[in-house]
Image (tube, rainbow, N blue to C red):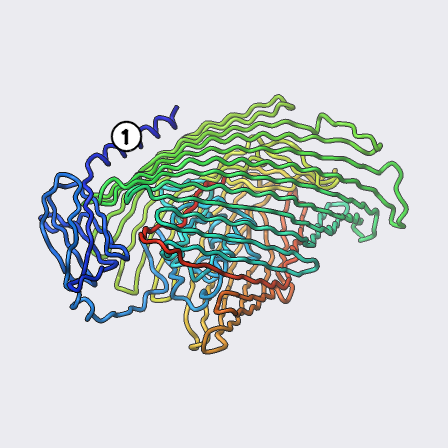
Amino acid sequence: MKIKTLTLIIFLLIAFNINGQIKITGQIHSNENIPVPFAEIILVSKDSIPLKSELSDENGMFTIESERESFILQIRQIGDILYNKEFQMSSNSNIGIIKINTTKSLQEVVVTLDKKLIERKVDRLVFNVENSVSASGGDGLEALKITPGLRVNNDQISMIGKSSMNVMINDRLINLSGEDLTSFLKNLKSDEIKKIEVITSPPAKYDAQGNSGLINIVTKKVKNNTFNGNLNSSLSQSKTSIGSGGLNLNYRKNNLTLTSDVNYSNGSMKPYQEYTIKYPNYIWEEESFRKSFSNSLSTRSTIDYKISSKTRIGGEYSFSNSLPLIKTKNNSFIYNNSKMLDSLIKNESRIEIKRKTNTYNAYYITHLDTLGRKINFDIDYVNYESETNNDFYSNSFFPNGTIKPNNYFAANNFSDLKIDIVTTRLDFDYPTKWINLNFGTKLTFIENNSEVQFYNTTSGTPVEDPLQSNTFNYKERIQALYFSGTKNLTEKLDIQFGLRAENTQTKGTSQTLSQVNKNDYFKLFPTLYLNYMINDYKIISLNYNKRINRPSYNNLNPFRFYSTSFNYSEGNPFLQPYMTNNFELAYIYKKSYSLLYISHIKNGFDQVTYTDPNSIIQRVTPNNFYNQINYGFLEAYSFKVKSYWENNSDISIFYYKTDSDIDSIIPDISNWSGSFNTNNTFILDEEKKYKLSLGFMYNLPSIAGSYKLSSFYRLNLGFKTNFLNKNLQLSINAIDILKTDKQTFTQYVNNIKQVNLDYRDVRRIRISLVYSFGKELKIKNRVGSNKEEKQRIK
């Protein structure tokens, strides 16, 4: 009923707006009777206030709408007013051919300005990709690598000082994550990107979920009446290989824009882990050899249609199907305190996973007037299904290798997960002479159903264990309202303030445990931004926001999932969301970017591996148990060392302190840390056809929640060239050449030290080929449109 009411409001507003419009059409010719393309047509009030602006098409034709019966129509080219006449109209009119004198316009001198590489808006940092030599001729993922404040490690994107982030294309959230997002960005040419906006503190318009940032990739204006696309393929070789391929198509004709892409990958990797637990009376050492197979297919299609000069509708459908397979061999060595082997436990598992996601989106955008007021309505539906079948067995051996009797154990752990998410959003942009307002509402409906079954297969015949099987249902409802205002206080000082209110109801039901957990809370999330321009190349900004981090669905599900016979994970239905307060002070000087940030987490939750001196069972479960403060400083700089050598580097120094509420079980920890990252691009020829890249990253020991992390570093080398008139691009990349991208995670629980070494089989060589094609369509009319996507992923 709420959705129907919102939709009715929208169409009433649209109908009210349309009824008051007067449409003026005409054609512009020169004195020589030649059509004048791309002239600017402006409607001006009698007191010289611009009301509306449009451009003539290739044939000099134009259409412009007015809400007033009396107005002045001007025609301009390169800043000159070539036509100025007052009109009085009460209905739609065709004013015929207007002749203008273009001689003066043609004699003007075009001046090209060197646009800034880094800019600062009131709520975001802007990196102008089109001005970067390093980004040219690459893809979207490579452009993100050199963007200040961002890191791309193993094709995973992160934002410095943030726990997570989302990606937008032209101000619309895209419904992709993980490998699907990586494939999409690799298919997006960096030469098609105008700028990348880094939003470290999202405004009130966006969800308050997660201590995350936003990346908005703004593409260049696309040519209309064209058909283009690309074919891509890559082969990545480490211990094993992974191959991928994809096709991207774009079609634009008149008012219609269609895009479609499909990607497929298949192969495997061999990550490795070591796990050590130092019990008071013995030491547990475990090594894990894993082979992870990937087999995934994803498709995505969008449609955008311009109904009129003011209204657009569109939609998106995406589908992904993934069939991962994980084979693991674990060897657990149990030593006494004299380092003498007491026993050996061997565990083997085979985990088969089926994941399927369907995402649907529809949107409606209409401009209400010539002042920039508009309505944006979105509705999304996401259906996610996952099945996991885990077969494992273990056996124990004496130090001499003989089997211990009565110690064999085998089981099958099966889980079925289904998630449905429906969201509706209504946004209003309402600029006034005094302030620019933005306000709206969002409704979210989430339902998660999961079922876990545990079968003991030691005897060879499956026997269900009802104590370790469970059916869990989780429902979440969120109602959100927000507003924000932006104002120029002075010529140099801008302010933006906002407030988001979210009302949340959750209900988790464990049928097996006959347990129901409800939660109902209302939270306010303020935002504030100040931006002061000292001069054209010195800008200082200050911002604040408050965020909420809600638990994932699996973290709330109290079922057990076994990775070995002695290690299992389970959710916590009593888990509470936690709040984060963020403060940032930023300074831009020419091509350098400085950032000072402070973040405070209250009642945070983290995964804890609980161990006990009297038991060999290791239980992994999340708990709310700590408060954390972290502050840091980032300095990023982009410059040309030589005409053929461009460098993008950053250095970060930060401090973490985690105060535990259960310090008798998990102690307080604190640590100073830092990181250094540099990306270098070398142009090897005058035509800029051959490029060499060299990247290096180093991280000092740091802290993540209740874990201490060791230092690590990585050295990458890349080569890029193109053929067939730049339509075919070849890239060769050597990643983690020295095999040093590995980390150790250390945690103390009940005074028992746990050390986990994780190496994800990062070192590899990747060869990629991208072939681009396209043509112009012979169409008379030219109407602009941009590629857009949308979705909220939780």
Q: Where is residue 327 in the image (x, y as percent from the top left)?
A: 73, 47
Q: In this view, does 638 lie above or below 398?
A: below
Counting from the top left corner in percent of width and height, residue 753 is at 67, 48
Quadrant where the image shows the N terminus? top left
Q: Nearer the viewer, residue 307 or 208?
A: 307
Residue 358, horizontal then vertical, whole percent: 53, 38
Question: Label 1 sits on what residue type?
Answer: Leu
The residue depicted at 27 percent of the width and 41 percent of the height is: 367
Camera sees residue 653: no
Residue shown at 36% from the left, 62% from the top: 118
Task: Residue 775: give x, y in percent of width and height.
Answer: 43, 59
Left of 405 or right of it: where is 298?
Answer: left
Q: In which quarter of the image is residue 522?
A: top left
Q: In this view, does 713 lie above or below 630?
A: below
Label 1 Cα neighbours within 10 Å, binned few <14 / some 14-19 / many ≥20: few
Identify the element where label 1 is drawn: helix
Above or below, comparing residue 420 to residue 40 in the picture: above
Residue 470 appearing in the image? yes
Q: Name the residue under label 1.
A: 12
Left or right of 514, for residue 520: left
State the residue at coordinates (18%, 43%). Answer: 66
Q: Closer to the camera, 255 or 454?
A: 255
